[in-house]
Image (tube, grey):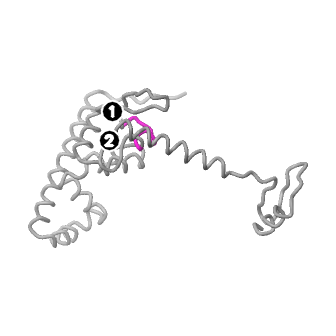
Amino acid sequence: MTTKAIVDSKRIEAFRKALGASVDNIVEASRIYVEALDENPRNAEVFADKFRDFVPPSAWSRFEAVGRKWMHPKLLMGGMADRKKGNIVKRLPYSLQERIFDRERFALLLPGGDTMQIDVLEATVNQADQLCNKTGLRSQSEQKSWLEEKFISDSLKKEHVEVMPYTIGDGRVSFRRNVSLTRAEVRRLLQEM
């Protein structure tokens, strides 16, 4: 028997409000940190020392990125289920990050030439990679080039996969039935062992 957890809407809304306030506070803290850095870059060391028991050293660069509006604050807490997709969004201009987190839909070129409107937060990593380059969104022609390059790359990878009539493991060779090897294949087999 499975029991479904029931949470009342008041708790959901209270959590949403508290979390939103936390994000707002992080944005404000990031702004203060950047302001201090702009006065004197050595203030980074002062902040790191004063908060060493509370803030990990790796977080300071993210505070600066949020404070300078290089990175959307939602990316601080992950923001996306897939880390690779999060990294794609992090490298985009801040204005585009805002549009993505506002759930704007963008035109994605399909292999057949049609387009579909996608929400980057719901897209696959490949779709996000096709749609976004380091400076923004790819045009339809850039997406077409990306698709063609990916197709060629995938085709080349498939061509180079050579299935040998044997497997090697634990110092043993296991042959498939009805196997005959050339001298070159025997040499290769001995080199692999």
Q: What is the x, y in percent for residue 147?
A: 47, 40
Q: Is residue 97 left or right of residue 1?
A: left
Q: Is residue 64 left or right of residue 128?
A: left
Could you tell me which residue is drawn at 8 percent across and 67 percent down? Answer: 39
Residue 7 sits in quarter: top left
Front one among 155 and 116: 155
How busy is the neighbourhood of tag 1: few (under 14 within 10 Å), some, or many (20 plus)? some
Secondary structure at badge 1 equals strand
**Total marks drawn?**
2
Location of the C terminus (image quadrant): bottom right
Q: What residue span does the magenta drawing correspond to?
A: 121-129
Q: What residue is pinned by disc 2?
A: 137
Q: Is residue 98 left or right of residue 87?
A: left
Query: In the image, is residue 50 above or below residue 4?
Result: below
Query: In the image, is residue 52 above or below residue 131?
Result: below
Q: What is the x, y in percent for residue 177?
A: 89, 48
Could you tell me which residue is drawn at 51 percent across and 44 percent down? Answer: 150
Location of the N terminus (image quadrant): top right
N-terminal label among 2 and 1: 1
Q: What residue is pinned by disc 1?
A: 106
